[in-house]
Image (tube, helix red, strand yellow):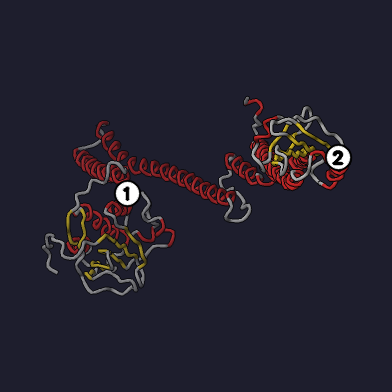
Amino acid sequence: MNRFVPRSLRARLLLITTVLLAVGIVVSDAVVSVALRGHLIARVDRQLQPIAVAMSRLDPALLDRSTGARTQALTGALDLISDLAVAYLGPDGDVVRSATAGPGVSPLRFGPELVHATAGTPLVIRGADGPEWRAFVVPRVRGGGVVVVAGSLGAVDATIDQLRLICLATGLIVVAALTAVGWFAIRAGLRPLRTIEETAVAIAGGDLANRIPGAGPPNTEVARLTTVLNGMLTQIQRSFEARAASEERMRRFVADASHELRTPLSGIKGSAELHLMGAAGPDDVDRAMRRIDTEAARLTALVEDLLLLARLDEPTAGPGLNPAPMDLRTLAADALHDVRALDPERPVRLTGPAGPDGEILPGPAEALVLGDEARLRQVVVNLVGNVHAHTPATAPVRVGVGRVGDEAVLEVADSGPGLTDQQAERAFERFYRGDGSRIRGPGKGSGLGLAITQSLVTAHGGRVELRPTPGGGATFRLCLPSLPDGRKFTEPSQKW
């Protein structure tokens, strides 16, 4: 059976609509025919009943040839009765007198059961080989018995047959015409699907920027489908672009990590080979061992940073934090001491954070957070080390701490050369180092400090912002969710 079902959606829709149209026309024609036939029969009944009442008052002897002639004239005045029959039945059911009129009267049998028929109720009498007859039985006024007046339904049946023929011809013409119109209408309606198909083929060929053009009013099904598909294609394109960018970052990360690991390994290998060749004296051996120790420590720190970043990037393993209530003023005080220890001549001050309008808020102020103090201390150490490595030793530094809105803020602002827009955009990339304009001495960093800083702060539910310092320099700003007031915690031991 499936062989006869068209595979094309267009052909299926056309077949379904054509079948439904044909069924609808057939049903409507049948309803009209039945309703019209009932209406015509009721009209025949209204014409027969007065005749039957009139005949019940006449003497059967009057049904002679002249009466038959008058009956013939009477049928000519009736619009739906072509043949008419009148019969008088005695009390025992025998036919006393009868008369017929019409061009094609078929023999009728008036049975004795008609004597007992309900008066005034229409009956159906079947002729020998012709159409049905509609009859009324009325008791005679004088002499007993009944009179039966029957009218042929031939004219009614002919009218219904003609109606059915007209409906059949009209239905065939309508179905054929609407099928042709439906073919073109369905073809035009499905044109957007062909456009979607062509767009999908183009995208499969690699053109991810291709989109489906809008079709029709905005609230139609096709328009909504187009909007949804275009949104899905945009998401797919972004996913592919993100995947390509991620792969590019991974390749760059592997290359940078290999370069960073190769440098200390080369130093260790060179010192070991020098010792094994016997070309080093006692002083050279000590120098080689110190270099091996230095490079091994550098290699260990680099590996630990890489492992920390890998653990922070793993969503299932988690960052391994031990959060507890704490005050960021503790870290701000430590940052102040670290800056003075690294650069004793550098001016440094402890203030509140910068407000929304850039003004320095009074402080240092309370900044309660739920965090891992050791990890957040590592963040501050990275920021202080970044200031020490990339700004002049005499450039002033400001450490701000406090609350801004619903966030606890700690910021380290230097007055160095600052960063260009390109440098600021890539500052938190792994293994990225700025150009020589910000390096005051030989750079020994791996370029992972700010990347670790951003990952640790993100793991605490916060963010790191990089802003230009008014008057020159760069400001690194840590924003963490603040604890509600009144939360119990251990007060910092530093004096403010």
Residue 87 x/y as whole percent: 77, 36
Residue 170 shows in the view: yes
Viewer-proximal residue, 68 or 469? Answer: 68
Numbered label attached to residue 21: none
Residue 164 shows in the view: no
Amino acid type at image mark 1: Ser
Q: Residue at x 35, y 62 (%)?
A: 466
Residue 490 x/y as whole percent: 11, 60
Viewer-proximal residue, 148 or 411? Answer: 148
Q: Total number of numbered labels? A: 2
Q: Secondary structure at mark 1?
A: loop
Residue 305 drawn above or below residue 376: above
Viewer-proximal residue, 466 or 73? Answer: 73
Numbered label attached to residue 446: 1
In the image, 176: left or right of 298?
right
Q: Residue 175 lies in what quarter of the image?
A: top right
Q: Residue at x 22, y 48 (%)?
A: 321
Q: Secondary structure at mark 2?
A: helix
Q: Residue at x 19, y 54 (%)?
A: 373
Q: Residue 399 lies in what quarter of the image?
A: bottom left
Amino acid type at image mark 2: Gly
Residue 284 x/y as whole percent: 22, 40
- Label 2, label 1: how many angstroms apart (C-alpha)? 129 Å
Q: Quadrant of the N terminus?
A: top right
Instruction: Give the class, few, some or many, for how many residues have Cα within 10 Å of label 2's Cα (few <14, many ≥20).
Output: some
In the image, 171: left or right of 480?
right
Q: Which residue is mark 2?
A: 68
Viewer-proximal residue, 223 or 440? Answer: 223
